[in-house]
Image (cartoon, helix red, strand yellow):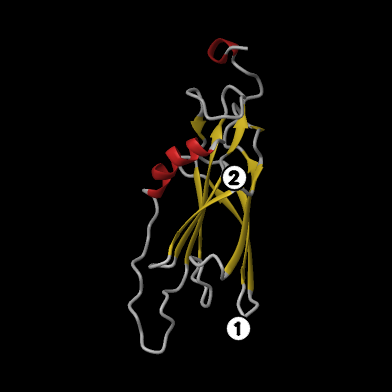
């Protein structure tokens, strides 16, 4: 998916985020709130089998996706690493989302402090009319980070399924 399409889609799914306000400062605690990390992406039906979201494509609710993430703190004080592997089902908008619990000691919004990788893989489609994997794996991420609230959103490139047969009347050759 090209970067322009991602920029157009980004505002669409950020409206579905539920963001908690930053916790108040407590004496003796770090000046940053505890990390709030969200990993998300979309699955769509590439109706014309052209590896792009066309006017005949649609977001696919009920698709199964496996999400693997690793967060590693890079600091002189710690060498912690957290690895997560979960399955998620897309909502009615074709979006899957993983809310990662607060991780004490990891300040995700500071690039120099955390190394993170996430990957999503298609498991299965919710419909037999669009169940052939197209883009079935992605690790390309657009990261949105807010230092003040220590909020990090990792948006993975869209994954897709295709129909078993291309509809030439709608899509052409």
* Residue 166: image location, x then y, percent: 63, 18
> Residue most toward the top?
169
**Disc 1 secondary structure class:** loop
Residue under the point 36% across and 85% down: 26
Judged by depth in the image, the label closer to the viewer, 1 or 2, is: 1
Q: Earlier in the sequence, mark 1 or mark 2?
A: 2
* Image position of 68 with respect to 27: above or below: above
Residue under the point 36% across and 88% down: 27
* Residue 57: image location, x then y, percent: 51, 27
* Image position of 155 with respect to 108: above or below: above
Is residue 132 among the parts visible in the rendering? yes
* Residue 7: image location, x then y, percent: 45, 41
Mark 2 lies on residue: 64
Mark 1 lies on residue: 77
Quarter of the figure that contains the C terminus: top right
- Report whether 132 appears left or right of 40: right
- Report whether 123 appears left or right of 41: right
Q: Within 10 angstroms of label 2, few (less than 14), some, or many (20 or more) residues?
A: some
The image shows a total of numbered marks equal to 2
Rendering quarter of residue 125 = top right
């Amino acid at each position: 998916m090209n970067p322009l399409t991602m920029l157009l889609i980004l505002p669409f799914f950020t409206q579905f985020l539920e963001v908690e306000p930053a916790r108040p400062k407590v004496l003796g605690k770090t000046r940053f709130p505890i990390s709030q990390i969200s990993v998300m992406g979309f699955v769509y039906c590439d109706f014309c089998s052209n590896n792009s979201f066309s006017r005949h494509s649609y977001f696919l609710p009920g698709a199964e996706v496996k999400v693997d993430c690793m967060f590693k703190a890079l600091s002189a004080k710690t060498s912690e690493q957290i690895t997560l592997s979960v399955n998620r089902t897309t909502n009615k908008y074709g979006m899957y989302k993983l809310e990662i619990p607060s991780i004490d000691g990891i300040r995700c919004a500071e690039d120099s402090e955390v190394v993170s990788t996430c990957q999503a893989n298609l498991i299965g489609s919710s419909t037999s009319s669009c169940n052939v994997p197209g883009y079935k794996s992605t690790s390309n991420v657009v990261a949105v980070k807010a230092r003040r609230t220590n909020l990090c959103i990792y948006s993975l490139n869209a994954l897709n399924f295709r129909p078993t047969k291309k509809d030439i009347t709608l899509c052409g050759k």
